[in-house]
Image (cartoon, grey):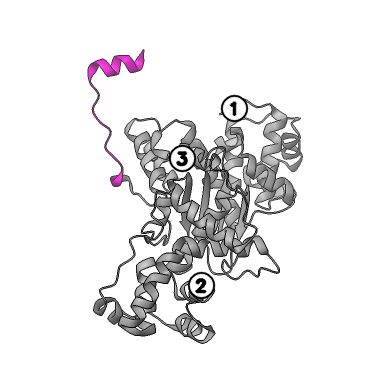
Amino acid sequence: MADIDARTLGERIRDARKRVDLSQDDLGKAVGLERTVVNKIESGGRKVTALELSDIAAAIGVRMSTFFEEPVPALVAHRSSQGLDTTDSKIDALLAEFAGEVEFVASLGVDELGLDAAAAVAQAGITRPTTTTEAEALAGRARELMDLTPEEPIRRLSESVAGVGLLAFSRDLGKDTADAGTILLRRGGVSLVNSHMKVGRRRLALGHELGHYLIADDYTVDWRVADHSDQVVPMESRLDRFARALLLPRTAVERKWSEKVSDSGVRGAAIRMASEFRVDMATLATRLKELGLADGGTANSVREYRTTKADIVEMNLNVPLESLGGTTVPRPFTLAVLRLVRDERISRERALDLLQGTFDEVDLPEIRDRRPDEIWKFVS
């Protein structure tokens, strides 16, 4: 944590208070201070005690240490563009939280986090796609960077994107909020996927966020991925195309679709393809149409198909290996936190907080017994 002066600390308290839509009077009542005292603290005219700062952090809903940490540059730029009076949306607040947690773990130097992989993206010379052809090509380049073949289904998308430095979290944000968002860190990036959507849509949303990450968009929040118009939001439309091409690579779809239709008919082919490549029917229908493999009527039929339990049993379909359902934490982040627990560099309580409730106390590794020589080395 950095040493900061009273004025900088006050500004950070003020910004945090405004983001949760608290007035100075509200904050003062919550922590037992007069509004005028809160005003002086925020202006840097009065120092704040450790106990007062702890109470302020609790009232605002942040960790006290966040007031002393240098914020992620992309987050600072985003908030500056929004204005201080703008209250964070749920996804903005969570993205900020996860970005801060990842930066905290990264500052402790654990190899398991894997953010060094972001260097390969920076060196790849990726540019923003200006056509659908370039969006398709970017999907192929992304597969190369993730060490995937041009045609294989992406079994665990969250692990594949982590391989290029993008850590994907998920949380159920409800249906009336954004699909996903992404923020660039000093190294790598963090995405948050709204797990309220069905699994195919969640994977499509993460594919879209990977596109933002690859073209180095500092901060993005996306609503209704795959519903963008090229005339209204061309870049978002191209990243939708990128995401579909990433999950449903052209050569694989072109080769397999006709084979499966011959074997199983259109419905059977659609169900098998959607299961193999782990996409929803709407994504498959759009992809078939844009590749010229289905006319409008066939695409509409595919969009309406639903996979039943009988289909799963009779066709021996894949059960998704990854769902991004509920609350999930990226595997490299989990491994890094567990390493810090084993090395006793963070408390078990802090680890549980970092792991977002996906672990219980009994799930954490036991503290190993230390040899006498290690104990003496530690205290010296």
Q: Pointer 2 and pointer 1: residues touching (CB < 8 Å)?
A: no
Closer-to-camera residue (268/167): 268
- Of 2 and 209, nearer the camera is 209
The residue shown at (44%, 53%) is 143
Magenta range is 362-380
The quadrant in which the N terminus is found is top right
For residue 184, say whether it is visible.
yes
Image location of residue 299, percent across then percent down: 49, 81
The residues tagged by marks 2 and 1 sit, at their Cα atoms, a distance apart of 53 Å
Disc 1 crowd rating (10 Å Cα; few below 14, some 14-19, many 20+) is few
3 vs 2, front mark: 2
**Residue 117 got which mark?**
3
| Label 3–label 2 contact, CB within 8 A | no
Q: Which corner quadrant holds the C terminus?
A: top left
Report x, y in % for residue 145.
Answer: 45, 47
Which circle marks residue 122 in the picture? none
The residue identified by callout 1 is 2
The three-letter amino acid code for the residue at tag 3 is: Ala
Name the residue rendered at 49%, 32% in the picture.
107
In this rendering, position of residue 216 left or right of residue 191 = right
Spot occupied by residue 227 in the image (x, y as percentages of width and height): 60, 71
Task: Using a 10 Å C-alpha cutoff, classify the residue at mark 2 as few (fewer than 14 neighbours), some (14 to 19) or many (20 or more).
Answer: few
Question: Which amino acid type corresponds to the residue marked 2 in the rendered image?
Answer: Leu
Residue 73 location in percent, x, y? 64, 39
Query: SS at mark 2?
Result: loop
Q: Is residue 110 magenta?
A: no
C-alpha gap between disc 3 and disc 2: 32 Å
Q: Secondary structure at mark 1?
A: loop
Return the mark for residue 291. 2
